[in-house]
Image (tube, grey):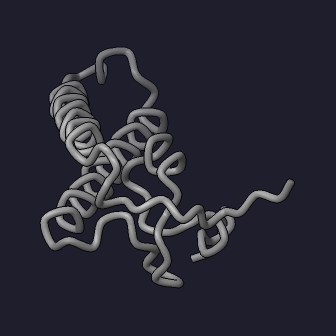
Amino acid sequence: MSTSLHEPTDVAQAPMELLRGMLEEAFSAHTARLTELTVVSRLPDRGGYDAHALELLTVSHRRGVADTARALRRMAEGTYGLCAGCGKQIPLGRLHAAPHVPQCALCQPAEGDA
């Protein structure tokens, strides 16, 4: 039995509304948390956060907002679910696990690659 990272599942037949909902929920959560962190960063004691930790959290949520916005844009353009690297369909399981990903596992750059 052999498995492929490029399953022949047609993303157009996938539960796109579920994926859209997941993306919209993630966008909303990242935006709300970024707003909270911005308010906390302006407090004299930074709400008890270490300055470095607060910066890392802020960067992470900014990235989350940007990643989900790009995924929603790809969805509106009709390119969502297609790998930006090889053009093949991203397996549905990968999209369920990380609906914002623009690439299949084979084309995903390793951590630290830029």
Q: Position of residue 88 (x, y in %)?
A: 49, 77
* Extreme-front residue of the structure: 1
Residue 82 higher or lower than 22, as above or below: below
Image location (x, y in percent) of residue 33: 24, 29
- Quadrant where the image shows the C terminus: bottom right
> Residue 39's spot in the image, x, y percent?
15, 28
Residue lying at 13% horizontally and 65% vertically, measured from the top left: 76
Looking at the image, which is closer to me, 20 or 58? 20
Task: Identify the residue shown where x is 30% and y is 65%.
Answer: 80
Q: Position of residue 104 (x, y in %)?
A: 55, 66
Q: Quadrant of residue 61?
A: top left
Q: Residue visible at 40% across and 62% down?
A: 10
- Residue occupying the point 26% across, 37% down: 18
The furthest residue to the right? 1
| Count of marks overlaid on the render | 0
Q: Quadrant of the N terminus?
A: bottom right
In-front residue for pair 46/108: 108
Q: Is residue 42 above or below residue 75?
A: above
Left/right placement of residue 88 relative to residue 109 reads left
In this view, the residue farthest toward the top is 48
Front one among 59 and 79 = 79
Up/down of 77 relative to 95, above or below:
below
Q: Quadrant of residue 36?
A: top left
